[in-house]
Image (tube, rainbow, N blue to C red):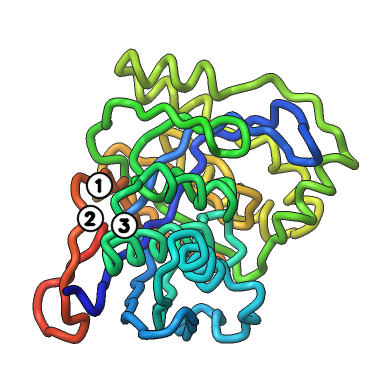
Amino acid sequence: MMNAVRLNANAKLNLTLDVTGKENGYHMLDSLVVTADLSDRIVLKKRKDGRSSVVMHGMGSESIPPEENNALRAAERFSAAFSTAGADITVYKNIPIGAGLGGSSADAAGVLLGMKRLYGVPDMGAVEALADELGSDTKYLLTGGLARMRGRGEKIDFLPEEPELHFLLLCPKERVSSRECYEEYDRLQPSCAPCTEEAVRLIRGGMLSWAAQRFSNRLYDAAASLCGAVKDAYAEARAFSPLGAAMTGSGSASFALFETKELAEWAKSRYRGKSRAIVAKSFYPKTNKEIKNPFVLGEDEGTGG
C-alpha cells in the first residue's frame, strides 16, 4: 500500500490568448497552451483521518493563507468526493507566483493526481470534474502538453507534439491579480482580432515560425495598465528578435520563443533587466512517475522539471 507520493507540477505558457465572451460571470477563453519544464515539487503523505494540511516553501508562498491555497483546496475536495482520508502536503515552489504561469492550478492538479495515487481512485473522469472546479487551467494541467484550451478550460484539444520549444521567460517581481486583470479588461473593452485559430492552423501545418508571429495575449493591455513591469518584460522579450513573444496568462511574465536552446541561453546571458530570467523548454508528459518514499536520494522523479 502506497503511503507517500512525490511528483512535479509543471508551469504552462499561453502562447496565444483570446477572450471570446462572458458567460455566467466568467470570461470565456480560446488559448494555445504548452507546459514547460519549470515546475513545483509536491510531496504528499497519507493520513489516517479525513483532514489535510499544506506547508509551502519558496517564492514567498509561505504567506498564502490556507483558505486561499489551491493545493489544500484540492486535497479537501478530493477527500470529500471520494470519501478518503487526507494528506499532509508539502509544496516546494519554483514557479513564480502571480506571473501567469499557472502555478496555483499546477499545484492543485498535482495534488489531485497525488491523492488519486495514494488512495487508488480509478475514476479519472471524476478527478477531471473536480479539477474544473479548481481553476481554468487545472484540468489541462492534469496532463499538460501542447493543446488548444477553450471555454473556462474545460474544452481541451491536444495537438501533435512539436519538437522542443525553447523559451526565455522574464518574470517581474511584481505580481498581477487575475481577478483585477479581468476587471480591467472589462473596463477597457479592447477590440482585437482573434489570434488562436490561425496559430493553431499553422502549428498543425508544421509552420511553427509563422505561428509564432501570431503569438499574442488579449489581456496584455489590461495587465500593463495595472503593472508597469508587464510592459518592461514584454518589451525586453521582444528586443531579442525571437520567433515570437507574448505575455502569458494574466501576467506579469512574458516569454520569447527561440529556435534553439543555445539562442535562449544567449539571450539570458545578455539580459540586463530587473525581471527574473529563466530558460525553459516545452514539456510533453508521457507518464506520471511515482515513488513510495519521497525522501530516497537519487534521480528526480515526477511529471517533469
Decide which of 54, 3 is in the foreground and name it.
Answer: 3
Q: Residue furthest right?
A: 187
Q: Is residue 238 visible?
A: yes
Residue sitting at x 63%, y 57%:
252
Image x and y of residue 225, in percent: 81, 51
Image x and y of residue 191, in percent: 80, 25
Disc 1 marks which amino acid? Answer: Pro
Could you tell me which quadrant the N terminus lies in?
bottom left
**Quarter of the rendering containing residue 256:** top left
Q: How crowded is the residue under tag 3: few (<14 C-alpha within 10 Å), some, or many (20+)?
A: some
Viewed as shown, does residue 147 lie left or right of 138?
left
Instruction: Relative to 3, say whether 176 is above or below.
Output: above
Q: How many marks?
A: 3
Q: Is residue 305 visible?
A: no
- Residue under numbered circle 1: 285
Residue sitting at x 41%, y 60%:
112
Q: Label 2 near label 1: C-beta < 8 Å? A: yes
- Residue under numbered circle 2: 288
Report, in whole angstroms, how far the alpha carbon at label 3 lies from the one at label 1.
21 Å
Disc 3 marks which amino acid? Answer: Val
Tell me, for residue 160, which label it has, or none.
Answer: none
Instruction: Relative to 267, say whether 73 is above or below.
Output: below
Decide which of 218, 265 is in the foreground and name it.
Answer: 218
